[in-house]
Image (cartoon, rainbow, N blue to C red):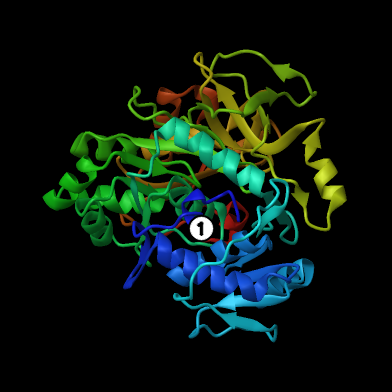
Amino acid sequence: MSALIPALQNPSDRPALRVGADALTYGELARAASALATRIRTARRVAVWATPTARTAVAVVAALLAGVPAVPLNPRTGERELAHILGDSEPDVVLAGPGDELPTALPRIDVELTGPAAAAWPPVGPEEPALVVYTSGTTGPPKGVLLSHRAVAASLDALAEAWAWTEDDVLVHALPLFHVHGLVLGILGPLRRGGEVRHLGAFSVAGVGRELADGGTMLFGVPTMYHRIADALDEDPDLTAALAGARLLVSGSAALPVHDHERIAAATGRTVVERYGMTETLMNTSVRPGGEPRPGTVGTPLAGVDLRLVDEDGSVIEELDGESVGEVQVRGPHLFSGYLNRPDATAAAFDGGWFRTGDMAVREADGGVRLVGRKATDLIKSGGYKIGAGEIENALLDHPGVREAAVTGEPDPDLGERIVAWVVPQDGEKPPAEADLADHVAGLLAPHKRPRVVRYLDALPRNDMGKVLKKALPNAR
């Protein structure tokens, strides 16, 4: 029996999960997952066609029970990338819903939501792989991240401590289930606590309001979702009341703009908590609920997580001054076990026992972490300064004429790199002047952080999680 979900050892009639019209108690989940686990127990690995359905949750829980690593597949993945993932992970079978059409000739098993009495399963070792989650592949073909039962348990338990997450909580979300945010935090998190998860199937502001008003205590989302919620608050007093009644609002996967933080807090009295993690590390830090609002920060390290900032020369940055920029490195029981079939990439990802995240940050006086961007795309070296794109983006979003903003660097013969702002204006017919935006940023931050070039777009290119695809910006319109 997987120790990840203790409530399945003595299953009850407590609600476990609901997706659309499908709802399962812990007893029903145990029976459905156990029946499927019996069918896959001899598999080396299984793939899961990770649609936003109860069947996806049952498939993953079944794999955990059987001790068989599950490979979540994004149903929208292109043909070439899907072929790479399947060729690399070599699953014996794909677990899917009866109506799912799969673009692959692999054997499949249709996941059912019923089953006979649950079987007793032997314990699964903590170092056994639970999931193989493929990265986005921004620097080459996607790599399979091996997440052990130990790593998943450690990260979820650290979040439970930070957020006072218990069996009494009812989590509401609409996140995709092929990555760690929606699947590990959003499905396995509530189940590990013995609580309930209600997945909306597809995000809607109305759905969020309905479920929070009907007993939901927690909401997980990404910035795009919270932006739409913030837009609706002025015209929807029921939504405002529903959010005000929630115990915890959490945003992740990308930075939540300060303006949306402020709008939600002003309307509901609730501050949105941000946390920081990635596929290889699961969760590293979080803002603690109930503390002073700190938009723009991702909080302090979670229990069991060691975190440091490292300069380009390899020296550790000790200053907690909010200015010294370094790469975030972490170590602890929450780390992945390595990349599948890639010992070279695994070795390159570590500095001794520390994982190199590739994220750049500064630390505040209290040890809180403020991310300023990715080392590869968001660290701009201009005029002798190291500048993080993230803080300039937040400053631009504080301008009333800016709807969306992204910042990159490009070669400059004098400065080394110049700061380029990619702006989606509130009014496409009357965009804010380039000089106005530069002065706005210089006034909020510092003159050397002002954009030297502003390019106006109709929309920023984004992935499924709302992250801006900066490499696609030069071709955007």
* Quarter of the picture holding the N terminus: bottom right
Compare residues 212 and 311 and report the one nearer the observer: 212
Q: Is residue 117 visible?
A: yes
168 sits to left or right of 39: left
Q: Quadrant of residue 313?
A: top right
Residue drawn at (19%, 39%), measured in percent from left and top?
A: 267
Using the image, determine if residue 400 lies above or below residue 76.
Answer: above
The answer to whether residue 436 is above or below residue 129 is: above
Drawn side of residue 266 relative to residue 165, left or right: left
Percent across and percent down for residue 213 are 19, 52
The image quarter in which residue 321 lies? top right
Residue shown at 78% from the left, 72% from the top: 87
- Say how many tags the image has: 1
Q: Is residue 184 left or right of residue 331?
A: left
Residue 50 in view, yes or no: no
Please, which residue is most extreme toward the right here?
344
Judge by depth and name the residue closer to the eye, 335 or 36.
36
Q: Residue visible at 68% across and 40% down? A: 335
Q: Looking at the image, is 110 positioned above or below residue 299? A: below
Identity of the residue drawn at 69% across and 46% down: 126
Residue tagged by mark 1? 462
Instruction: Sort mark 1 into few (<14), some (14-19) or many (20+) by Cα contacts within 10 Å.
Output: few
Give whichever of 468, 169 is nearer the camera: 169
For numbered disc 1, what is the local secondary structure? loop
Q: Please, what is the three-letter code of the amino acid marked with disc 1?
A: Arg
Q: Position of residue 31 (x, y in %)?
A: 48, 69
Q: Residue 224: image x %, image y %?
A: 39, 53
In the rendered image, residue 103, in percent from the top left (x then y), is placed at: 63, 84
